[in-house]
């Protein structure tokens, strides 16, 4: 009986992907299985708070103008000052009626555009941490040649790449590829380190904050994103080759972010 109960409980537990799908579908509804996951996962709990803020902002943006308009119309009806569209048209010359409708249409269009932009910005701001991993993978796929480099990058070239992002590393890492890449609106160091089990990519991401260390699997890439002072660092390998954990631990010791100087 104990073994059966344990298996059923394990089968019903949420992982991070299932939890975020549930949160994204209905942020205000928290079933017991999701609540259990949120108690143990600060990253998903932070994501739920973001989605709740987003839903509240969208609700306010959509509801306030409509409520104000309905309240004004209701006040006019009760005061006897409301007139139907037919009566107004009958009392106004056709040319003036047309002219009056044009500014209103333009205002409505402008309000719609502002609302769309606002919602778009809020959606971008509330993206889950997993999308950072997807963006890192997408960037790395655009630089496939980086995996083939084996010669050690000179210290002067590495220092130049790091300096552009205001980053410093303690000496010792065997870096075979180093570029300063444009990523999410800023230059970030994109490195390849030769580990005992093969090449591992490291991207140092100032300003990209992660609530906790988080593993990801974006076939054929696997890796981890870890928080550091001033941002985060993404470490990943391809086809399971490369010692991701060892490289990450070395970088956490060697990394000197701008805020730490």
Image: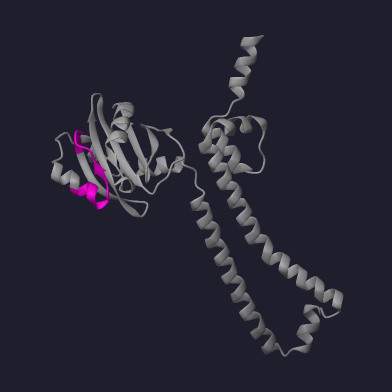
Q: Is residue 67 above or below residue 252?
A: below
Q: Is residue 129 left or right of residue 137?
A: right
Residue 161 visible in this rendered orientation of the protein: yes
Reply yes or no: does residue 172 show up in magenta.
Answer: yes
Q: Is residue 229 above or below residue 111?
A: above
Q: Residue at x 22, y 40 (%)?
A: 145
Image x and y of residue 125, in percent = 49, 52
Q: Which residues are magenta?
A: 160-176
Q: Quadrant of residue 105?
A: bottom right
Q: Residue at x 62, y 51 (%)?
A: 55
Q: Is residue 74 above or below residue 192?
A: below
Residue 238 visible in this rendered orientation of the protein: no
Q: Residue at x 52, y 62 (%)?
A: 117
Image x and y of residue 22, in percent = 60, 38
Where is the N terminus found, in terms of image quarters? top right
Image x and y of residue 127, in percent = 50, 47
Q: Residue at x 77, y 69 (%)?
A: 71
Reply yes or no: does residue 218 show up in magenta.
Answer: no
């Amino acid at each position: 009986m104990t073994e059966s109960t344990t298996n059923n409980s394990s089968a019903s537990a949420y992982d991070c992907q299932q939890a975020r799908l549930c949160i994204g579908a209905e942020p205000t509804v928290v079933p017991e299985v999701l609540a259990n996951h949120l108690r143990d996962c600060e990253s998903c709990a932070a994501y739920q708070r973001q989605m709740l803020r987003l839903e509240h902002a969208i609700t306010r943006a959509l509801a306030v103008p409509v409520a104000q308009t309905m309240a004004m119309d209701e006040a006019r009806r009760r005061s006897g000052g409301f007139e139907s569209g037919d009566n107004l048209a009958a009392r106004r010359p056709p040319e003036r009626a047309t002219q009056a409708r044009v500014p209103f249409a333009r205002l409505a269009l402008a309000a719609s555009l502002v609302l769309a932009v606002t919602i778009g910005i809020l959606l971008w701001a509330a993206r889950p941490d997993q999308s950072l991993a997807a963006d890192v993978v997408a960037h790395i796929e655009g630089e496939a040649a980086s995996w083939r480099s084996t010669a050690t990058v000179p210290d002067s070239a590495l220092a130049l790449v790091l300096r552009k992002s205001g980053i410093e590393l303690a000496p010792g890492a065997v870096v075979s590829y180093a570029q300063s890449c444009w990523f999410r609106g800023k230059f970030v160091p994109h490195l390849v380190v030769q580990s005992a089990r093969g090449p591992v990519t490291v991207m140092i991401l100032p300003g990209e904050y992660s609530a906790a260390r988080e593993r990801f699997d974006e076939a054929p890439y696997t890796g981890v994103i870890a928080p550091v002072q001033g941002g985060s660092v993404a470490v990943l390998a391809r086809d399971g080759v490369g010692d991701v954990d060892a490289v990450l631990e070395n970088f956490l010791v060697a990394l000197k972010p701008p805020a730490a100087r």
